[in-house]
Each structure stands twice: as structure tokens, then as C-alpha cells.
Image (cartoon, grey):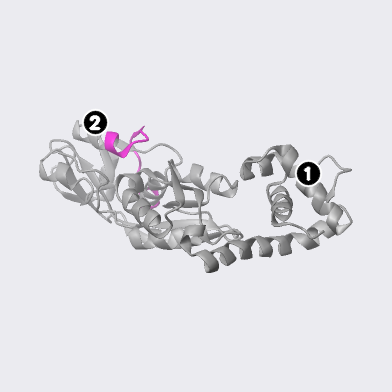
Amino acid sequence: MPASLRQIEAFFWTARLGGFTEASRHLHLAQSTVSKRIIELEAVIGGPLFDRTSHALRLTRAGEASLPIAAEMLALEPRFREAAGGATTFSGPFRFGTTELVALTWLPKLIVAMKRDYPNVVPVPEVAASVDLFGKLAANELDLVIALDPPQAPEFTALPLDAVQLEWVSAPGFGPELDTIPLGEMARYPILSQTQGSGLQKLVLDWAVANGLQINRVVQCNSLNVLAGLAAAGLGVTFLTASYFEPEIARGHLRVIRTEPPIPPLRYYAVHRKDDVSPLAARIAAIAQRSCDFSARSLPRD
């Protein structure tokens, strides 16, 4: 009896994720089903793929030799289906993470493009801080992450997207009298920032400290809209995308304070795992590259 793709799939994900429980969760199967398929596969090849004598799950020599071939076979399967049936053969949930700024701007445009190209795929976006999203990508809990400052890890592929330009903003009656000041003068004012884990927060504050800014006081909040409201209320200075908050600036609720040197542009990336057996994550990353637009608003505001 030949080995089936379902048996190979159970073996691959158990080895990849390090356990039957993790594989069953990933495959949305009962753990007993995953175990049964692996036992059936071992019966077909005539030997064990896992060493079950140790406490930790380990591959046998046969398992180690078979794993890269299993990955190739699983990667060929969606390519075969796509060649035969087109993009509609891709179906089911696609789990991806974005930062709040992406969600506030071009996330709807991305999802519309995803549904146009892959109508049977169900987008499942998660909005969180960059560090949390990359942790979930590494743990196979997400298929793609769109965020700042990706880890320099060999298991990730990072496709560059657009850069975003941030500006210091405050209430019109708060802060320095001049609209352009040396960066060091920002030390005189409380700085409002996102919470720990935010890529924006880390990159901007690390840059500011490296350029000699002594942070006076940091009020932390995990919402860009709330930070804009706190700044408009005169509670401090924050850094936001002036293009997104242009209506608030035009109405006089916020003012832009430029510094020398200015905050450098910060580039976003669409990141997926190199060893994904499905090409879908790489395809969605390319769609993200075409859809990226930080000047957009996901919903118009009065």
C-alpha cells in the first residue's frame, strides 16, 4: 500500500512542530488521528520515523532522511492543484498579523485584493505589536506578518514594503514655540508613546536616544488614535504619521513639530517562513507589496 499525503502531512507537522498535540492543533485533527496516520505511514515504510524510547520526541535516522522529502511532496501538492484548478483551489483560513497602523490604513485594501485573487481563502487578520506577531509567526500560529523591524532570522523571508514617515505632534498650544527645533529640546516635554513591543515605539525611541535625546517622561498607550487624543489634549508630545492624521492637523487639533535631525522613514515588511510548504504566504506577501498605502484611511472620519 503506498503512503498517502495525509500520512506524510501528519508526519511532517509532528516533526516540524515537535509534538503530536501541536500537530493536531495545527491540522485541526484529533491527536489520535495524527498518531494513527503516522503509525500507518511507519507500517508502509517498514520502520519507525520517531524514537519513542526517549521523553522528548526525536526523529530516527529514517525520519531525518524522510523529512525534507516530505516537505517537497507537500509543497508539490498545492502547485498541482493550482495548475489543474487555478487559484480557487486555495481555500480555508489564512492567518496573518498586522500592526495597528496597517489596520488603520490599508488593511481593507489588502483583504479586498486577497479575496479577488483567492476567493476561497478566508482572511483571518490579527492586530498586535510587532514583537508579539513575529513570535506567533515563529511558532506557526500565523502564516504571514506585516510589521516593522523583522527578526534577522534565517528561517524568515522579508519582502520590503513602503516606508512610513513619522512626525512629532502636539496640541497647538503645547510644546515649543517654533515649529522646527533641535531634537535635544524634546527632552523638555513629556513624550507619549506606544507600549513595549511596538516596532514604531522601539525604532523611534532607540533612534532618538542614539541621537542624544534624553527622554523626559514616557506615557505609554497601545492605541495610535488614543495617543493622538492625548496629545491634542495637551498632555505631551507623540510621534504619528502626519499623512493619516492630516484632518486633525488641518482642523487645528494637532500641530507638527519638526526636529533636526528628523525622524527617519521606517520601512515595513511582509514576512513569512522560508520553509512554508504552501506558496500562499509568499503570494499574499506580494499582494501586500502592491496594496501598501499608509496615506489611506480604513474608514473616513468626520
Q: Position of residue 89 (x, y in %)?
A: 51, 58
Q: Which residue is mark 1?
A: 36
Q: Is residue 162 above or below residue 103?
A: below
State the residue in front, 259 or 59: 59
As shown in the figure, which amino acid type bears the numbered disc 2?
A: Leu
With 298 as the anchor, is 121 left or right in this view?
right
Q: Is residue 288 above or below residue 136?
A: below
Q: Position of residue 85 (x, y in %)?
A: 51, 64
Q: Secondary structure at mark 1?
A: helix
Q: Which residue is mark 2?
A: 235
The answer, for residue 49, to whether it is visible in the render is: no
The segment highlighted magenta reads 209-226
Q: Secondary structure at mark 2?
A: loop
As shown in the figure, which amino acid type bears the numbered disc 1?
A: Lys
Report the residue at 45% width, 47% height from top: 122
Packing grade of label 2 (10 A; few <14, some 14-19, many >=20) is some
**Residue depth check, mark 2 versus mark 1: number of the one nearer the observer:** 1
